[in-house]
Image (cartoon, rainbow, N blue to C red):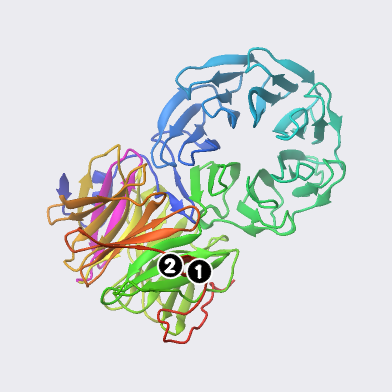
């Protein structure tokens, strides 16, 4: 244990020196990169394990087993051009560098070359057959049906940028090609129905590069094609849609930027797609009729690759600034301490946020829902022991907002001025009712903004950069101090104490490979409560004493659920929230010494259905999503 008392920035350069990461985001993008790694560009996730992710950082292939929190080097190659985890056998991975294609069948322990040369830039596999793989390069398309032992080839005078195999009819596959302004003048859309021996040109018009081709998960007849401009100025209609196996196409780009670099389709929902563009990520829920920005932190970023897991809930993005991850969650999102044993619950369903309540007797009351919004998402809540909920919102276009909701509905809301490179990550409520908003930036930079009851924001000094560390949560005590929780990609963690723009002290904890810090709360004794989680869903809540020691540690679990957030109040109780993929959840209430006091499964009506706000005896008033 290390303890230092410093002012302002010195502590960050002394104690916080490790690879950068952020808290894995529930409905908010968080990102990370290995220490000293080159720029990231490619990402591929395990289809069945949302926490197992591979990232290509220049010539280095790295692996994360905890959803991007920490990384380890798997293998070094030449400059990596394509990365593919086979959906039929996720331990089988293909990497194409600037010379050859390599394969591992044991998750990266051993590698062998399977294609020499070919300048492969795209890889795809039959989702139902691990032995079948297509590899597209500068001079054609290769195909193996024996797991890479032998390959056949189709010579094509073009450069392949995207490949996809029809899972219902593996002899049918589609390819998109690029135009480089030298060898290949146009982009093409190609189709094979004989396993790759022959390819038919179905390009609807002169195009720049065809950067991505994806299939609808329900109807194989429906395809989407993404295009980008070329040096000749050929038209780039963004995304186009075909409902007849590629025979004809219609525009499907309303709301998208001109340059679309990658596409993925939700494997469970027809018409739900995500597009990586030159200025962030966009989502459509209506098969391309309209697109909206998705995910605040990546607004304006160049997105080079997207990957989605089998549940459709976990999305990974490769960018030049690192690999980013998001858990797209509905149901319970956050918990806050109300007065005298009351707990507040923030939940989300069908683009609406709602605040419910659990009273001291264990009775649940559903909350009024916000107006629906596909752009704004409620991500965090705090209460400070009062009858008001302070809600932090994030917008896909890069904005952040704060809303205060009282017993009769919205009392006020404010939208913060966009600050490029910064994001409002968490919030807490001070004893005087003001809101502390934690802002985080690239390179571990951090600021605390104090928002008064009229919405005016005062920003404190900037801490950092702290190369390798990121702040992940904030909590306030009764004495006007703010506690910030920190996490590093090498597994270390820390907590710092702030007051009036001065960092007063900090504690640093060594890495524990079995645990990751997630959230912090401050109890009635003004001591911090620390939430740590294990990969199996176990939660550990401990109390941080005056010397930085973690005491009174107790572990809890809830079958089928994952721990999300904690909150503590003046009533001496700590609330621990568990949530599940299906929208279910549970609030576990702990006493002042961390002993179990009660468990409260969350009824579906509370998590999803708007009813009455805070009290069944009061009249409900709908509060709004932030101004759009």
Question: Is 490 a magenta residue?
Answer: yes
Q: Report the residue at 36% width, 65% height from top.
A: 335
Which callout, 2 or 1, points at the residue further toward the start of the chain? Answer: 2
> Is residue 67 positioned above or below 458 on the image?
above
> Is residue 178 positioned above or below 292 on the image?
above
> Is residue 24 positioned above or below 586 on the image?
above
Q: Residue 362: in sight, yes or no? A: yes
Q: Does residue 406 appear left or right of residue 102 in this picture? A: left
Question: Is 185 a magenta residue?
Answer: no
Q: Report the residue at 66% width, 24% height from top.
A: 133
Question: Residue 186 falls in which quadrant of the image?
Answer: top right
- Span shown in magenta: 479-501
- Which sits in the foreground, 321 or 388? 388
Name the magenta segment's main secondary structure.
strand
Q: Does residue 385 appear left or right of residue 108 in this picture? A: left
Q: Which mark is residue 353?
A: 1
Question: Residue 346 falls in which quadrant of the image?
Answer: bottom left
- Find residue 31 and report its horizontal and vertical position in percent: 46, 46
- Which sits in the foreground, 201 or 301? 201
> Is residue 253 positioned above or below 390 on the image?
above
Q: Report the residue at 52% width, 58% height from top.
A: 296
Are the two marked residues, 2 and 1, in contact with CB atoms closer than 8 angstroms?
yes
């Amino acid at each position: 244990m290390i303890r230092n008392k410093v002012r302002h920035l010195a502590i960050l350069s002394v104690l916080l020196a490790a690879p950068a990461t952020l808290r894995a985001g529930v409905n908010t993008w968080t990102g990370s990169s290995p220490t000293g790694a080159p720029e990231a560009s490619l990402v591929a996730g395990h289809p069945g394990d949302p926490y197992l992710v591979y990232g290509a950082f220049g010539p280095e292939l790295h692996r994360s087993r905890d959803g991007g929190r920490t990384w380890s080097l798997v293998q070094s190659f030449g400059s990596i051009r394509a990365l593919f985890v086979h959906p039929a056998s996720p331990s089988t991975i293909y990497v194409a560098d600037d010379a050859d294609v390599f394969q591992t069948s044991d998750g990266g322990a051993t590698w062998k070359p399977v294609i020499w040369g070919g300048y492969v830039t795209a890889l795809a596999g039959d989702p139902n057959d691990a032995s079948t793989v297509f590899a597209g390069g500068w001079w054609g398309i290769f195909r193996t049906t024996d797991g890479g032992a032998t390959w056949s080839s189709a010579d094509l005078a073009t450069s392949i940028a995207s490949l996809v195999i029809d899972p219902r009819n593996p002899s049918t596959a589609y390819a998109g090609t690029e135009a480089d302004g030298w060898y290949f003048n146009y982009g093409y859309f190609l189709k094979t129905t004989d396993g790759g021996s022959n390819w038919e040109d179905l390009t609807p018009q002169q195009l720049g590069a065809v950067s991505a081709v994806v299939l609808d998960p329900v109807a194989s007849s429906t395809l989407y094609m993404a295009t980008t401009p070329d040096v000749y100025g050929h038209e780039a209609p963004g995304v186009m849609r075909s409902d007849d196996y590629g025979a004809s196409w219609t525009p499907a780009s309303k709301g998208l930027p001109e340059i679309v670099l990658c596409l993925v389709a939700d494997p469970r929902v027809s018409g739900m797609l995500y597009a990586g563009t030159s200025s962030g990520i966009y989502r459509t829920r209506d098969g391309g009729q309209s697109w909206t920005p998705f995910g605040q932190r990546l607004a304006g970023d160049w997105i080079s690759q997207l990957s989605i897991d089998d549940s459709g809930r976990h999305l990974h993005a490769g960018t030049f600034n690192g690999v980013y991850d998001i858990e797209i969650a509905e149901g319970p999102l956050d918990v806050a301490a109300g007065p005298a044993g009351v707990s507040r619950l923030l939940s989300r369903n069908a683009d609406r946020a709602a605040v419910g309540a659990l009273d001291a007797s264990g009775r649940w009351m559903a909350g009024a829902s916000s107006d629906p919004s596909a752009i704004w998402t409620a991500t965090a809540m705090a209460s400070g022991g009062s009858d008001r909920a302070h809600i932090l919102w994030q917008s896909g276009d890069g904005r952040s907002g704060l809303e205060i909701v009282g017993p009769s509905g919205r009392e006020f809301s404010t939208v913060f001025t966009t600050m490029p490179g910064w994001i409002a990550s968490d919030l807490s409520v001070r004893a005087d009712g003001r809101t502390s908003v934690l802002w985080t930036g690239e390179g571990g930079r951090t600021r605390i903004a104090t928002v008064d009851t009229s919405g005016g924001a005062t920003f404190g000094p900037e801490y950092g950069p702290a190369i390798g560390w990121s702040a992940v949560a904030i909590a306030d005590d009764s004495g006007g101090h703010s506690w910030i929780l920190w996490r590093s990609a090498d597994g270390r963690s820390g907590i710092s104490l702030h007051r009036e723009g001065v960092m007063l002290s900090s504690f640093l904890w060594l890495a524990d490979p079995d645990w990751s810090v997630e959230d912090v709360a401050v109890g009635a004794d003004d001591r911090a409560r620390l939430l740590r989680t294990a990969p199996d869903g176990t939660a550990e809540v401990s109390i941080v004493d005056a010397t930085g020691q973690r005491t009174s540690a107790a572990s809890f679990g809830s079958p089928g659920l994952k721990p999300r957030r904690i909150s503590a109040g003046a009533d001496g109780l700590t609330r621990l929230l568990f949530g599940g993929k299906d929208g279910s959840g549970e609030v576990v209430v702990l006493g002042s010494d961390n002993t179990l006091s009660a468990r409260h499964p969350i009824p579906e009506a509370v998590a999803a259905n708007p009813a009455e706000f805070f009290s069944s005896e009061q009249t409900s008033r709908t509060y709004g999503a932030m101004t759009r």
